[in-house]
Amino acid sequence: DAGVIQSPRHEVTEMGQEVTLRCKPISGHNSLFWYRQTMMRGLELLIYFNNNVPIDDSGMPEDRFSAKMPNASFSTLKIQPSEPRDSAVYFCASSLRGGIGGKTYEQYFGPGTRLTVT
Amino acid sequence: AQKITQTQPGMFVQEKEAVTLDCTYDTSDPSYGLFWYKQPSSGEMIFLIYQGSYDQQNATEGRYSLNFQKARKSANLVISASQLGDSAMYFCAIGSASKIIFGSGTRLSIRP
């Protein structure tokens, strides 16, 4: 079975440029999550979707960040304009969605996109 | 609100010994799940084990077991017979419904 697919795996860009990260979740999963990982701040949840609808975007650092999920098999995270402090590894993860009071399902992570903004 | 605490930033263990990684949590949700993930130096996040808050028995997956003490709000990971390949960062996480919150991690190093 194909796992979560992310592209690109590495991205180097100059400050001020637009960056788009892409994610394909595991087929049949209905929740999708975007995380950012840095040495200083650890693993941070940026936003998550249930059934393609954004549920919680409180982790999105600022208006320069936006995320979309136009269908069940694709999501993007866009940074415009990018800044050096955005340099991090960005993970996408997917899971089944548990109902309130029901099981919380484990998340499966993609390989991550290592973003470097110079 | 939910909170996860991992108090051991780093640990060194001799190969073949058992190791316990600590995790405590706080939540107001009556139903929740506890997870452990492994992140080797290659960077990928690997799901290891899950414990539901209403599960009566501690979860086990091969050499991994979860020592779940609900009254103490702890969910420690036990790795039996450690191997060199167990050297990695280990993250504890808590979730309810869909959202999962991760701890700061413990770096485990296995000595040959």
Image (cartoon, rainbow, N blue to C red):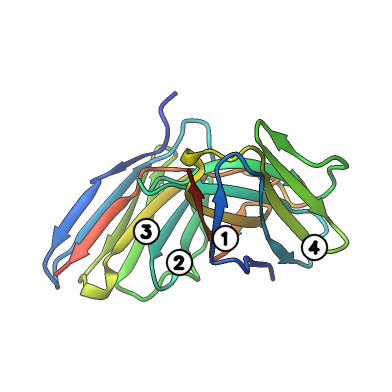
Badge 4 and badge 2 in a common chain = no
- Asked which secondary structure carries label 1, the reply is strand
- Asked which secondary structure carries label 4, the reply is loop
- A116 left or right of A41 in image: left
Q: Are marks 2 and 1 in contact (CB under 8 Å)?
A: yes
Depth check: A98 or A11 in front?
Answer: A11
Q: How far apart are marks 1 and 3 (CA)?
A: 21 Å
Depth check: A106 or A68 in front?
Answer: A106
Q: Distance between the residues labelled 4 and 2?
A: 22 Å
Badge 2 and badge 1 in a common chain = no
Q: Distance between the residues labelled 3 and 2?
A: 20 Å
Chain name for mark 2 = A
Chain name for mark 1 = B
Chain name for mark 4 = B
Given this view, does label 3 or label 4 mark the residue nearer the observer?
Answer: 4
Residue type at mark 4?
Lys
- Asked which secondary structure carries label 2, the reply is strand
Q: Name the residue under label 4.
A: B73
- Asked which secondary structure carries label 3, the reply is strand
Q: Mark 1 points at which residue?
A: B102
Q: Where is residue B80 in the image (x, y as percent from the top left)?
A: 66, 39
Given this view, does label 1 or label 3 mark the residue nearer the observer?
Answer: 1
Image quadrant in which the N terminus of chain B is located: bottom right
Q: Mark 3 points at which residue?
A: A67
Q: Mark 2 points at which residue?
A: A42
Badge 1 and badge 3 in a common chain = no
Q: Position of residue A60 (x, y in %)?
A: 42, 69
